[in-house]
């Protein structure tokens, strides 16, 4: 099975000056044979995803997360 990360660019956050700025949010991770299969698993475990208009996914080449800064 392959690993996928799901994210959305719906929404905003506040910058240090209090102004709204667009952002992306990581919604979570799931495994599947392909993107559609992984998304079905993700949706079954995370009902909140129905609140977003656009959800994107990316296949991960590794399950490691590195801290850069």
Image: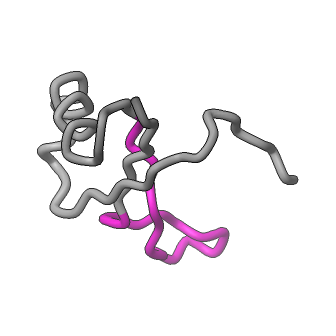
- Indicate the position of residue 56 as horizontal and vertical percent values: 32, 59
Task: From the viewer's perspective, tell me whether residue 51 is left or right of residue 10.
Answer: left
Q: Nearer the viewer, residue 58 or 51?
A: 58
Task: From the viewer's perspective, tell me whether residue 34 is left or right of residue 14.
Answer: left
The residue sitting at the right extreme is 69
Quarter-of-image position of residue 41: top left
Count how many numbered circles sit on residues in the image.
0
Quarter-of-image position of residue 39: top left
Q: Nearer the viewer, residue 69 or 63?
A: 63
Task: From the viewer's perspective, tell me whether residue 49 is left or right of residue 63.
Answer: left
Which residue range is magenta in the image? 9-29
Instruction: Give the residue drawn at x 81%, y 44%.
Output: 67
Instruction: Give the residue drawn at x 38%, y 43%.
Output: 27
Q: Give the vertical position of 2 relative to 54 (above or below).
A: above
Q: Nearer the viewer, residue 56 or 63?
A: 63
Q: Give the vertical position of 60 relative to 3 (above or below).
A: below
- Indicate the position of residue 4 as horizontal and vertical percent values: 42, 42
The residue sitting at the left extreme is 50
Q: Is residue 15 magenta?
A: yes
- Colour scheme employed for the rendering of this structure: one colour
Quarter-of-image position of residue 38: top left
Instruction: Give the residue drawn at x 47%, y 67%.
Output: 23
- Indicate the position of residue 61 as horizontal and vertical percent values: 59, 46
Q: Quadrant of the N terminus?
A: top left
Q: Is residue 50 magenta?
A: no
The residue sitting at the top extreme is 45
Instruction: Give the residue drawn at x 36%, y 54%.
Output: 57
């Amino acid at each position: 099975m392959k690993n996928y990360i799901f994210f959305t660019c719906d929404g905003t956050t506040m910058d240090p000056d209090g102004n709204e700025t667009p952002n992306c949010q990581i919604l979570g991770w799931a495994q599947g044979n392909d993107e559609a299969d992984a998304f079905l698993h993700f949706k079954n475990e995370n009902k909140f995803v129905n609140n977003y208009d656009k959800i994107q996914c990316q296949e991960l080449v590794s399950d490691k997360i590195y801290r850069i800064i």
